[in-house]
Amino acid sequence: MNLQALREHCARKPGYSEDLPFGPDVLAFRVAGKIFALMDVDTFASVNLKCDPERAAELRERYTGITPGYHMNKQHWNTVLTDGSVPNRLVLELADHSYDLVRASLPKKQRESLS
C-alpha cells in the first residue's frame, strides 16, 4: 500500500479533506472536519484507523500488522502497517470502515449534507 493509493481512494468520499494538524509530518484524513485516518506523511509505514472495538480485537488476533492505535484510544483505533503484512484490499476496507464510523457519529444534519 502506498500513500497515493490510499489518498485517491479516500478522496472520493463525501466531505473528505486532509491537513497536517500536528506539524509537517502527520497527515490527517477527515470527514466533515473529524479525523478518520492519521499517518506519518514521510514514511507511511502505518496508518491509524478507527474501528469497531469487537472487530478491532478480531483483526489484532488475525494480523500481526494490526495493533492497538499508537497514541490513540486503544479500544477504538488500530495502527495498520502498510508493509504488505496486511493485504492492500483490507487496508482500503478498514479505511472505509473508519470513514463510516466517523461519519455516523456526525450530527444528523451534517450527515445528510454529505449525501
Image (cartoon, helix red, strand yellow):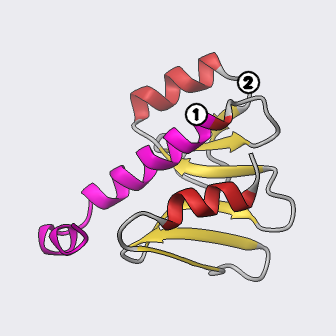
Residue 35, image x and y in percent?
Answer: 48, 67
Above or below for 45 versus 25: above
Q: Name the N-terminal-most of marks 1 and 2.
A: 2
74 horizontally vs 46: left or right: left
- Which residue position holds label 2? 64
Q: Residues within 10 Å of mark 1 (few under 14, many from 20)?
A: few
Quarter of the figure with residue 44: bottom right
Principal secondary structure, stretch drawn in magenta: helix
- Which residue position holds label 1? 90
Q: Nearer the viewer, residue 93 or 5?
A: 5
Above or below for 68 versus 35: above
Q: Residues within 10 Å of mark 2 (few under 14, many from 20)?
A: few
19 horizontally vs 39: left or right: left
Residue 39, image x and y in percent?
Answer: 70, 61
Quarter of the rendering occupied by the N terminus: top right
Above or below for 56 versus 103: above
Disc on res. 102: none
Amino acid beneath label 1: Leu
Amino acid beneath label 2: Thr
What residue appears at the point 55 percent right and 56 percent down from the top-left corner? 9
At numbered mark 1, what does the secondary structure look like: helix, strand or loop?
helix
Q: Which residues are magenta?
A: 89-115
